[in-house]
Amino acid sequence: MFHISYEAGILEDPNTTPPVDMWKLTESPESAPTTPDQITIQFKQGLPVNLTVLSDGNKSYTDAVDVFNALNALGRKHGIGRIDIVENRFIGVKSRGCYETPGATILRAAHIDIEGLTLDRNVRALRDQFVTIELSRILYNGHFFTPEREFVTAAIPSSQRTVNGVVKLKLYKGNVIVDGRSSDEVGPILSDDRDGIRIKYFVIRDSMTRGNLRWTNLVGLSRQTRPASSRLSRSASKSERGDPRPVFAER
């Protein structure tokens, strides 16, 4: 259900191109449809709770298995989820493997994207520096039923508390393309910078303050600039008076 892997035989030569008929779960990107499918995936505390296929009459899936099976079908259709890699095995040898993981590839792209909008910067950094690396090593080496795995995974639910929102995706010829994302966990604050340019900051609402909104780490910004003529004249005046700061005609 999750994936299929291919090893050994002709794949022992890392320079041998896998035969076309080896792949079983996905269409080749070359033969995939020329019309993309557009979907949305909703996450609640980091878990996918809804899949809507916009290009199929807004057909919706909410059961976890149904969501995954539907994403597998869409990934198969559009040639998504193929990789060909050389791995470093636990015993110290390198091993070439080819994998097909259509549904999980779509989910991973969506999950990484919604984390970018909703996950606290420092929490994400700590998670990626420790949990991601250690859990990958534990699972790859077959140590799932161990105390260290329980210890590491205990941190995951807390890290995903604010990972709530919806990601818009387009599936096309082997690609998972993010078209947008939204979440009630973030909100805008407008302010002026020192040059009088309007700045829009998106910050995380900390929902742990018992009903009070506490604004935390900056996760993105967009600028609404003045007309180009105004920017050009200001840049010219800075140059004429010998302003040491860089001069940019456009922002």
Image (cartoon, grey):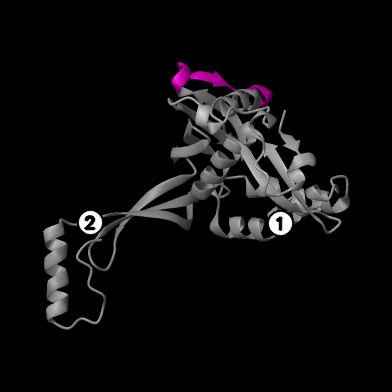
Q: What residue is at 79 percent from the left and 40 percent from the top?
A: 9
Q: Is residue 200 left or right of residue 85?
A: left
Q: Is residue 126 left or right of residue 251?
A: right
Residue 10 in the image: x percent, y percent? 75, 41
Query: Which of the two residues, 207 or 231, is positioned nearer the viewer here?
Result: 231
Q: Amino acid at mark 1?
A: Ile
Q: What residue is at 79 percent from the left and 47 percent from the top?
A: 139
Q: Amino acid at mark 2?
A: Thr
Q: Classify mark 2: helix, strand or loop.
A: loop
Residue 102 in the image: x percent, y percent? 62, 32
Residue 56 in the image: x percent, y percent? 47, 17
From the viewer's perspective, is residue 139 above or below residue 177? below
Query: Which of the two residues, 15 or 124, is positioned nearer the viewer here?
Result: 15
Which numbered marker is on residue 25? none
Residue at the spot of label 1: 133
Q: Is residue 85 left or right of residue 140?
A: left
Dividing the picture into quarters, in which one does residue 74 lie?
top right
Residue at the spot of label 2: 225
The earlier-in-sequence mark between 2 and 1 is 1
Q: Classify mark 1: helix, strand or loop.
A: helix
> Looking at the rendering, in which quadrant would you find the C terminus?
bottom left
Q: How many marks?
A: 2
Gap in angstroms between the C-alphas marked 2 and 1: 41 Å
Residue 44 visible at all: no
Q: Which contiguous range is marked in magenta?
A: 55-66
> Looking at the rendering, in which quadrant would you find the N terminus?
top right
Residue 65 belongs to the span the image colors magenta: yes
Disc 1 crowd rating (10 Å Cα; few below 14, some 14-19, many 20+) is few
Disc 2 crowd rating (10 Å Cα; few below 14, some 14-19, many 20+) is some
Residue 116 visible at all: yes
Q: What residue is at 15 percent from the left and 56 percent from the top?
A: 227
Residue 172 in the image: x percent, y percent? 48, 32
